[in-house]
Amino acid sequence: MNVFELIADAMHEPELAVSRKAKVDAAISSGQHVIFDDEQDGHTLRSSVYPIKSPKGGITRLLVIVHDITEQIMAEKQARHNDLVFKALLTLFLVLSLSWMMRAFCLPVIISA
């Protein structure tokens, strides 16, 4: 996929085309690589744009690499959800254990006094 295909592919989504063109322009004007994420058709795409310089130092080409990271993003969200569930279950276990220990060890002392 060349840079024009990257931008043209987003033409049915004008905001996406404008955003992508701005990132490509930033790579060209700065001479530095640019990495950005955007969404298209329900997929999260990570694009890397690398300016390729001639021996004289001018930018003659761009290397554009696009990865579909949708599954990675979904896996990260699932992992965060699982972490929250685990922490909630651990908290519940600790509260119930403490409650049981208080009943088992403290209540008899209070009653006998």
Image (spheres, rainbow, N blue to C red):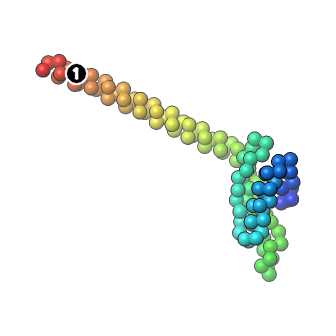
The relative height of residue 85 versus residue 15 in the rendered view (above or below) is: above
The relative height of residue 61 versus residue 73 in the rendered view (above or below) is: below
Q: In this view, does 22 lie to the left or right of 104?
A: right
Q: In which quarter of the image is residue 27?
A: bottom right
Dot 1 surroundings within 10 Å: few (below 14), some, or many (20 or more)?
A: few
Q: Is residue 40 left or right of residue 79?
A: right
Q: Which residue has dot 1 on it?
A: 107
List x then y, in percent, for residue 41: 79, 42
Can I make out residue 50 in this image?
A: no
Determine the secondary structure under disc 1: helix
Q: In which quarter of the image is residue 29?
A: bottom right
Q: How many labels does the image show?
A: 1
The relative height of residue 76 versus residue 55 in the rendered view (above or below) is: above
Residue plotted at (17% across, 18% down) = 111
Disc 1 marks which amino acid? Leu
Can I make out residue 42 in this image?
A: yes
Residue plotted at (83% across, 72% down) = 60
List x then y, in percent, for residue 78: 60, 38
**Residue closest to the far top:** 111
List x then y, in percent, for residue 51: 77, 68
Residue plotted at (37% across, 31% down) = 94
**Residue closest to the far bottom:** 56
Residue plotted at (46% across, 36% down) = 87
Quarter of the image where the N terminus is located: bottom right
List x then y, in percent, for residue 18: 80, 56
**Residue closest to the far left:** 113
Q: Quadrant of residue 4?
A: bottom right
